[in-house]
Image (cartoon, rainbow, N blue to C red):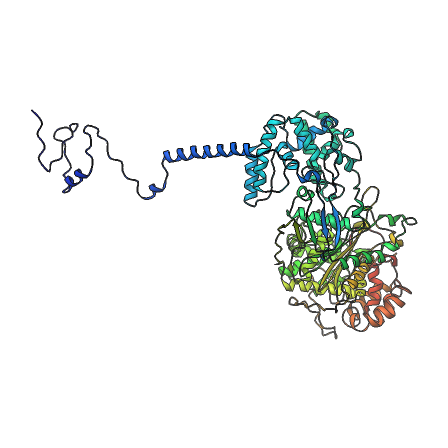
Amino acid sequence: MSDQSPPPGWTPRDPDTPPGAPHDLPHPRAHDQDRQQAPQPPGRGRKPRRPRTGWRRAVPTWRMVLGGLLLLALLIGGVLVAGYLLVDIPPANAAATAQSNVYLYSDGSLIARDGEVNRVNVPLSQIPRTVQEAVLAAEDRDFYSERAVDPKAMLRAAWNTATGKGTQSGSTITQQYVKNYYLGQEQTIKRKVKEFFIAIKLGREKSKNYILEGYLNTSYFGRNAYGIQAAAQAHYGKDVNKLTTAEGAYLATLLNSPSAFDVVSHPQSRPRALARWNYVLDGMVKKQWLPAAERTTTAFPEPGKVRAAAGLSGQRGYLVEAIKDYIVDNKILDDKTLAEGGYRITSTIDKRRQTAFVDAVDEQMVSKLEPETRKADRLVRAGGASIDPATGKVVAMYGGIDYTKQYVNNATRHDYQVASTFKPFVFAAAAENGSRTQDGRRITPNTIYNGDNKRPVTGGRIRFAPENEGQVSYGNITVNTATDLSVNAVYAQMAVDVGTGKVKQTAIDLGIPENTPNFVPGPAMALGTLQAGVVDMAQAYATLADHGRRTPYTFLEKITKGGDTIGLPPRTPTQAISREAADTTTSMLVSVVDNGTGTAALAAGHPAAGKTGTGELDRSAWFAAYTPELVTVVAMMGQDPDTGTLQSLYGALGESRIGGGGYPARIWAAYTKTALEGTDPVDFDLELQPGAAQPPPSTGPETEPPQETPGEPSPSTPERPTRPTPSNGTGGRNQGGQNNGGQNNGGQNQGGQDNGGRTNGGRDNGGRGDGGRDSGGTTQGGDQGGTTQGTQGSAQGATQGIDGDPAEGLRPPSAFLE
């Protein structure tokens, strides 16, 4: 008998459900749903799948994830196979026969060409085994055991390039050889993809020795040397088969940064180059290619001098090298890419002003050198840089007498102290930060400080008692006068009052690179112990000239290759310090030129602000100055032409000492006069900080004396400056220079500028004619020029001794800075 059908409206009972179990009540429309859905087989007990709702709908299932990964793997595999089949090993690229780069003045006329190929291929058998191993230790220590490509390094480099994080390598030697010989140095993803496939094919078709030989013969080693043989000749003047292990390690070091690690042309890079050289040797020991005992006795092999191409003689080589360094340092192109050639580089150098700079140095200094009769003249070097402060463009540069004779660029080197040209940055920091003295007085040009020789600095953690130039004691003087006369005691104390960290930060804000050698916060930094380059100092002074607005300097107008224009880094002006701080500093530097150690700059015929400086042991003499439209820094330096060591300039040019107010200031004036020829003199438009204006002349005893510094003599009656007994009489400083004419009556207020400063006594009667230089610069100059007519006579007599013309005999040689 068959089962009877259930009555309509009843839900069939699940046979697995125990009798008596509760059942859900039927939905009123259950029978309608039953008609629309397929009947469920009895006895399964599975619950229907719950639909994915809400955020779960956006989450892929595991089946979707697995399927996606399999699809991606198939896609990558297909791309790799297709790339391997489609990319062939191409013929040698243009880098194997490198083109020339063309360097132009701002008007489009030619400076120079470079890039003539210097390459001689040699077989691997002629390259000493230790030299090969040094290269492997530097670039790819697992070369013989690894595959041709390193996918992780490739992905990392491609990602960094795509995300703008800079260019990084990590490529194997095989990949580097492919880049050198078959492709190019462009840091693009397309080039890296090609490099990847060609390297794989090359690794399968060629031996490791073949690849290493090709790499050593195509790599760039600086000094326009392509390949290990050309490098051996360029750096050591010998064939590659005669290289020692140490020399091979140095050449391997250059592969990382060919130009920057050349310790001859870039002496400031010596620490980094030595660190890399040691890394190479230590790697050889680690790989057991070099005995540890031999490693400990290996000395650094000094490379030979740079032999410049004839086409880079005169200033052309200096300009080309400075432009190259700017391109590489600012990561516009790396030096290997630049060496590949084909670039047309238009610089900011103004041809007329460049010629004027060279002529000024030749007329004011070089023509007076007599190295055959004066040994000290063999030591003389000069460097200079001129910047338009409104645009930051370097319009002229003097690197040395001739690039083929003096290969180190004196305008960009970083191994000479800047001396007292740093002092304006100390005051700028004080004005910017609203700094006060130890007893709470606001620091302005009129603030009184004690300027005694060897006065201990107070308020700091470092004990320091600086000597003044000539060991002169000045008593209590204003900051303005201390700047005119470059008083070390005042500025060392001021640096502590401001805070040496703030002083350093202000200097950085103005444009001094933070990594400048010997840039150490401390009271001695006020004396200019750091070793900034001439161009760096011109950048910082340009910020002051442009009212505290810093525009990063540049050597470049444009770079093109073929029809493409290479992008240049942005140079957005920024307000480094307030206008009031910058302008107040400028006001004091104007006084230095008018009344202080920089009076030689008046010959330019334009209002100027500047500062002199003389380095430790007289190894350098500086003049940094500017008009409202042009900033120029000139430095003289002493260097042994044979050993390259820094030397003092005592006796050079027939003078007992060389100061910044002498030859450097005269060069500055001659150049500036020509560079600004045809333009009207422009006065400085200055906005001074509160309290910075010159006080009215003292009219009587009712005048309130300046606030006294605790523990110091009252500044209302400044002490007469004293000097050691064997100094130069009583005129230049004692009677007229400081007390009667120099500071109180004639120096600043009455005679310094108006009556006697320039016209009557300063230059005509007493300054140079009667007292300043001819009759009695040391004995009578102060009395006749300073007291009678004004300061400039005493300033000329006194100033010449302080900083300008040591031939006047006012200061004995000493080891401290001015």
The residue under the point 74% across, 38% down is 225
In the rendered image, which quarter is residue 341 located in? top right
Q: Quadrant of residue 18?
A: top left
Q: Residue at x 84, y 72 (%)?
A: 760
Query: In the image, residue 714 lies at what x, y percent?
Result: 73, 64
Furthest-left residue in this view = 1
Indicate whether 35 appears above or below 701.
Answer: above
Q: Nearer the viewer, residue 524 or 537?
A: 537
How many dots with numbers? 0
Q: In the rendered view, would you say 510 is above or below 138?
A: below
Q: Is residue 694 visible?
A: yes
Q: Position of residue 489 (x, y in %)?
A: 74, 56
* Towards the viewer: 111 or 450: 111
| Residue that lies at the very extreme toward the right in this rendered image | 373
**Split into 4 quadrants, where in the image is the C terminus?**
bottom right
- The front one of 390 and 288 is 390
* Foreground residue among 13 and 455: 13
Image quarter where the N terminus lies is top left
Location of residue 258 (image quadrant): top right
Q: Is residue 302 visible?
A: no
- x and y percentages locating residue 35 in the rendered image: 17, 38
Horizontal and vertical percent for residue 192? Answer: 58, 38
